[in-house]
Image (cartoon, coloured by chain):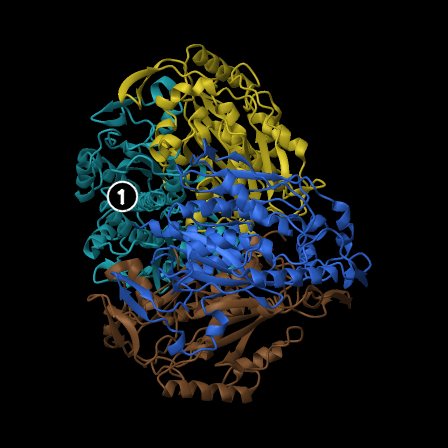
Chain colours: A blue, B brown, C yellow, D cyan
């Protein structure tokens, strides 16, 4: 078992880059909730390839077909299944990688695990394309969270060292998230966005790639959600987040920077006002002891530079067991950070929603 | 469900800071393996309180009593249960926190979750003391990993901004891990260790606290371990790691720094030699696509400054719903990073071992 | 979560009687095993409707389309997804049941659970049609078991009180299972088969239905498979078996009859011969303490008479909250026992295979 | 993993017949509920050994010590751990079974699984003694169910072929359950109880044993509880029930007898009255499609004759690999059915409660 997550909801993801279809089954969704498929399509479009000059030219409609679970626009209680047919595939571009693993990719490790039967084409099940069904699940769950007053949104915090204006961990608002979501490039400050785009173009023209950081906020989550120890919100979010292929790190609240601070500065004083207890600062990222404090959940995910680059690299030939050179063909993004933004939102939503359901059990 | 982890092995942790006992049940351990209880005791001693001038004066023997699962020194196939009696408890020191949540602690969020019935005393189930049963489980599993040629070790990478010499991600050896493990202070470079100790003492004398980073390596794990998407090694390690209360971030391999690099520099070229394929560098931290590459697993965990400080802080009174001042009493470490080192090892071992068992299913 | 089962493999089933498609995702199958799709088709055909005069005239090709997980005839390590399009649907026949729950069906309980949004048409997710994806999963797993020398087969033990010759619990052989599997009617003794068919025809002509018992054997399972307490073979088999809608009871070995026996008669003496330990009799049905003994696994499942009958019955109108009469239309089997035979085999195979994988973890 | 069950609550059971202690950890219990430990003690006493002339003379106080999770009489949100020390053990009586497996016991299969390291003494983890921690968990959960108006009770339906008056599946009342629970022998009709006791005594004097059937009812469960397919109430109850060592069969409602009936007789007509929909009969045992109908849940469990008998039996010697004779020593019940009654209640309660919590998630 592997490509499945969740306790109260259970998300199973299937497909390979070039199999007939990719898709997801979501078991345990609440019956009676309305799902807006048009809105889901818009969410999916944010990660779809081929949108502009700085993303891969592979074009897939990426419109999920709902096979079950929705009737007359409502979740009917049966598991929801959705598939996307793979149409614009070009396996010939990947012929090399069967014998020559691409550095930074799962080609090598998947072969160590599954030997010759691994579907190398396009990375098979390890392709970034599998984040599409993750976004189907996440996009649906974001709607369910929205119906409970919970908002999830992310922006590019950093690309190639260019920093966007961070979310204010105390004041970040639904309006902020909405603005980033609807803009042409998901940043708080469009000026820095232009610098990021320039860095991406420059790397792409050099046959190279760049990485970055995505910052995500969850607003409106009531205090008291999350379970102790292994099912804290941090555990849950991290457990889903690392399903997004290029993510190599995560930090909550003040994170690594906070570890260089002192207790007196990093602790967030409690204050009360208007019959409500909040914290003056939010270095804890909205989570204490794994449980939500009612403050915004804020975390950042580190995304490595796209491993597929057209520059020639050193690798090996499995068949000849000798060192060879490889120039990755295929169609790739010189930076996947912009398309990763909705994936991070999807991962956060899935984790938070499963936790929220756990917290409802004993009401 | 919450304080339980694992698919092939299942670790359940129980207890509160001041309940009669704390402990763990480990279900699914392989029968027939020898467990060295003396060695387990030594492992436990590395996280035990009261060892020296820079840790809490609370003294607990912390010697686990085995209730079941071991017969004549061997795992007998029945679930292993172990308990530690709580003896040196001083609940009176925590009287304040019932009404006044300590900033940076779970006092507030636990109350939001469990209302008045939460066992506030010493933080209850949210106490760092619960890492003792985590270390029982981890210490036993480290022995099982050792029997398969897999070594787990960590060091203090950073305290209060003072950096230890990092593990060499390609060359880090069992000898390195052994040396750190047996030393009086778990660092690679004892000189920087002295600087760290000075920083801890200084913070403690000011009634304040400091945080840091622990770096952990897993050696000898064969290539091909880990499952796709939600059960990759990164997902699994993170899912256990955040059970350690003060951890707020994790990064694998080049992590956040790698996200500022380029594909051509961050990709690790494959090379072959001696009939084996390795990578020249190890920015991937031994994990690609969630699966082990055969290179050392290397990750770092950010640990926040101890939230319990004796300096006066702002908080609220639940009963009066007004802002008040709080000076945390009780016995606390001005820096828990040194004692967190074996906890990080325990978390890594548990996650890696469960993954290793998954990979054995289909052999 | 609900329509998903398994620890080492994870089977997720989706679809409604009249949704665009039904299907399954199987996560965790071993890579490298060959799957014979033609043989799978033959297995599916054994439960397919419309085969003869005593089963429902609904005709569905019921040929699964593989969307992922198989490449060049081999399991490639990615989750296997398979769908069957629903084509020959006639929802008009079920218009009545939206307001008038069919006695003996899930119409009423599903409405209590999901209110008006439940997809009543054809029983929705509760339709016996959902045993088709169960048989996809089971049919594939039976092939995997076969590759390890384990055979699974069932026969009609009883219909309408007519008893077939039982499996000899000690001597039942692969040849017996093969003969039943390939015959036109799955019984040991074709003479009693004719009596059963006559009973079914008679009930059908009266607008009524009959039930029966299916007996299943698993051969070749080595001793030592199964986990204590909640994951014993009996627990696992029962947990899957009751997913088949009409099953209301299960007994292992001598079962209910054994409870009327004495210890001295019901105990199976151990004997050794040829370097092997077996039991002289097999009242334990091949399972002691939840663990396989190496003797044939033998169990029986009680199947209730098809609840859908054309005779008029008493029921209620939801909208008018009054007692009404209902004559079930639609196309139904007067006895589903023959078609349940492969479903019972599928359930047994899934449970046994998951247990077998658990037992491999610690080898 | 094995000796753990549950999704929303997670019950882990540990211990061996002669280990220092046996016990349970229950994770996920709702905080804030009151637990009456005296009432728990009374429940435990119903399965305790040594109560009268027809049960084993082994005497254990069997009073659980609560190690965590209860504070001031209330569940505090932390996992509940409880242990029972093993005191009156006499391992010498079991010396034989290390080499000579007792027919009908798990001695042989456990050895096949765990080889020489299995703790044979008293059956180790496979001892019926492990139903004591099951009853701790079940006894606590019965109290939680009671607080929601749900009652669980069982009686001896049959011993040695002597039948008690069955529960009326429509009219069975809390008063019936109460009467059986408080009586000296758990039957509806004390006259048949005397016949059963005579049969037990007779078998015991002959060095033999007898089995029987326990019938259990769950009252007050609202309609709509249970999940489709693999998490239906029947699946869940069966999955827990077979953890009780001697149980070899289970049937819900009309069960095996129903399979010999016709649809027109076995279907339960819906009727409405007083604004409520019920069924006129209850052949479905309160469960349709895995979901509760609001009618009493009624099921029966077949319990094999105690395998430990003092009559000499055939078995083998592991060390000599030859056929030998065995006369089981140790202290055993000639019939464990009376003591199994609370175990069946515990199993039912655990399964129903976990299902009930699942159904609350989406309210």
Report the front residue among C21 and D260. Answer: C21
Query: Crowding near pointer 1: few (<14 within 10 Å), some, many (20+)?
Result: many
Q: Is residue D156 above or below residue A356?
A: above
The quadrant holding residue C315 is top left
Q: Quadrant of the C terminus of chain D?
A: top left
Q: In the rendered view, does B161 fall on the left or right side of B84?
A: right
Report the front residue among A326 and D290. Answer: A326
Q: Which residue is drawn at 32% across and 55% down?
A: D133
Query: Is disc 1 placed on a helix, strand or loop?
Result: helix
Q: In this view, does D327 lie above or below A188?
A: above
The chain under label 1 reads D
Q: Residue at x 24, y 44 (%)?
A: D148
Q: In the rendered view, does D137 fall on the left or right side of A133?
A: left
Question: Where residue A181 sits: x, y (%)?
Answer: 51, 52
Q: Residue at x 46, y 56 (%)?
A: A176
Residue carrying label 1: D338
Question: Where residue A270 sits: x, y (%)?
Answer: 31, 69
Q: In the rendered view, does A106 fall on the left or right side of C212?
A: right
Question: Where residue D105 sits: x, y (%)?
Answer: 42, 48
Question: Where residue B72 sits: x, y (%)?
Answer: 46, 68
Residue found at the very far front of the displayed protein: A191
């Amino acid at each position: 078992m592997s490509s499945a997550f969740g306790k109260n909801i259970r998300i199973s993801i299937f497909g390979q880059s070039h199999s007939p279809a990719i898709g997801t089954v979501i078991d345990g969704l609440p019956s009676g909730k309305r799902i807006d498929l048009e809105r889901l399509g818009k969410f999916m479009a944010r990660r779809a390839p081929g949108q502009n000059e700085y993303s891969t030219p592979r074009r897939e409609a990426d419109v999920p077909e709902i096979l079950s679970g929705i009737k007359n626009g409502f979740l009917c209680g049966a598991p929801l299944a959705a598939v996307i047919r793979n149409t614009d595939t070009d396996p010939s571009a990947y012929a090399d990688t069967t014998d020559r693993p691409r550095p930074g990719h799962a080609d090598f490790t998947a072969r160590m695990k599954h030997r010759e039967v691994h579907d190398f084409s396009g990375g098979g099940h390890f392709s970034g394309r599998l984040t599409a069904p993750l976004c189907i699940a996440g996009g649906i769950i974001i709607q369910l969270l929205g119906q409970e007053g919970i908002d999830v949104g992310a922006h590019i915090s950093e690309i190639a060292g260019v920093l966007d204006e961070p979310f204010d961990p105390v004041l970040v608002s639904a309006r902020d998230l909405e603005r980033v979501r609807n803009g042409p490039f998901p940043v708080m400050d469009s000026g820095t966005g232009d610098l990021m785009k320039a860095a991406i173009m420059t790397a792409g023209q050099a046959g190279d790639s760049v990485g970055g950081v995505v910052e995500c906020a969850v607003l409106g989550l009531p205090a008291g959600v999350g379970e102790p120890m292994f099912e804290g919100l941090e555990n849950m979010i991290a457990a889903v987040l690392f399903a997004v292929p290029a993510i190599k790190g995560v930090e909550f609240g003040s994170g690594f920077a906070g570890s260089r601070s002192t207790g007196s500065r990093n602790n967030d004083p409690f204050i009360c006002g208007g019959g409500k207890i909040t914290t003056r600062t939010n270095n804890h990222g909205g989570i204490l002891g794994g449980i939500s404090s009612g403050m915004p959940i804020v975390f950042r995910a580190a995304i490595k530079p796209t491993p597929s680059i057209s520059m020639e690299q050193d690798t090996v030939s499995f068949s000849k067991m000798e060192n060879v050179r490889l120039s990755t063909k295929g169609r790739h993004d010189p930076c996947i950070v912009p398309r990763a933004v909705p994936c991070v939102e999807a991962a956060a939503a899935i984790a938070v929603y499963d936790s929220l359901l756990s917290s409802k059990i004993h009401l």
